[in-house]
Amino acid sequence: MSKISSESSAESSVDRRTFLVFAGLGGAAVFLVGCGGDGPTGGGGDGGDDGGGDDGGGEPDADVVVEMENIAFNAPGGGDDVTIQLGQTVGWVNRDNVQHTATSSQVPGGGNAFDSGLLSNAGTFVFEPNVRGTWVYFCEVHPNDMVGATIVVQ
């Protein structure tokens, strides 16, 4: 009788060990997937034809590019305001060594909101407004310094 009891105990401990090994591997896999480096660091958005985000560097494929540099939005011609025609796109590129976002805070009626998500250095984001009007946007990371920038769509 003790032999049967001993085998059950050994069998039970192997099953427990196997379970713990597989549970540990499953937990590690979930952790690695959640921390993967290829996840979006920009892009997304709440509508419109946004080009998504990209941390590959370079310039975004957009009609007008706003640089995020020195904790400020720098539009072509100076300042942080952009005027475009309906059907054109606005892109952002992060030139700082800190993360930024381009996030709409005011959207015209019928317009799509946008949010680049966090953009690391050289990260880009593109947004195509879907109606005429004025969008106001800011950086969620630096809301006191990078705020009140506008996109006017004619």
Image (cartoon, rainbow, N blue to C red):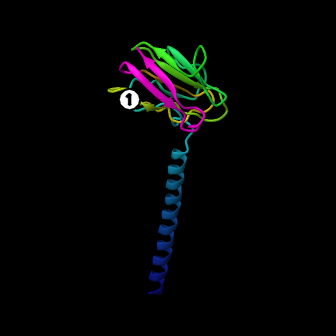
Residue 38: horizontal and vertical position, in percent?
A: 54, 35
Question: 135 or 25: nearer the eye?
Answer: 135
Q: How many marks?
A: 1
Viewer-nearest residue: 36 or 16? 36
Residue depicted at x 52% and y 37%: 39
Which quarter of the rendered picture does the N terminus lie within?
bottom left
The quarter of the picture where the C terminus appears is top left
The magenta-colored residue range is 129-154
Give the residue at x 50% y 58%: 22
Q: Left or right? Give the position of 100 relative to 63.
A: right
Circle 1 SS class: loop
Q: Is residue 137 magenta?
A: yes
Q: Residue at x 55, y 41 (%)?
A: 36
**Between 10 and 56, the one nearer to me in the picture:** 56
Farthest bottom residue in view: 1
**Label 1 neighbour load within 10 Å: few <14, some 14-19, many 20+:** some
Q: Which quarter of the picture shows residue 142? A: top right
Magenta highlight on residue 98: no
70 up-or-down from 76: above or below: below
- x and y, in percent, of residue 43 in the image: 48, 30
What is the quadrant of residue 146 in the picture? top right
Q: Residue furthest left?
A: 110
Q: Indicate the position of residue 6 as horizontal and vertical percent values.
A: 49, 80
The percent coordinates of residue 140 (x first, y second) are 53, 38
The residue sitting at 50% across, 74% down in the picture is 10
Up/down of 69 relative to 65, above or below: below
Where is 65 relative to 14, above or below? above
Residue type pointed to by label 1? Gly
Question: Which image quadrant for residue 57?
Answer: top right
Residue annotated with mark 1 = 47
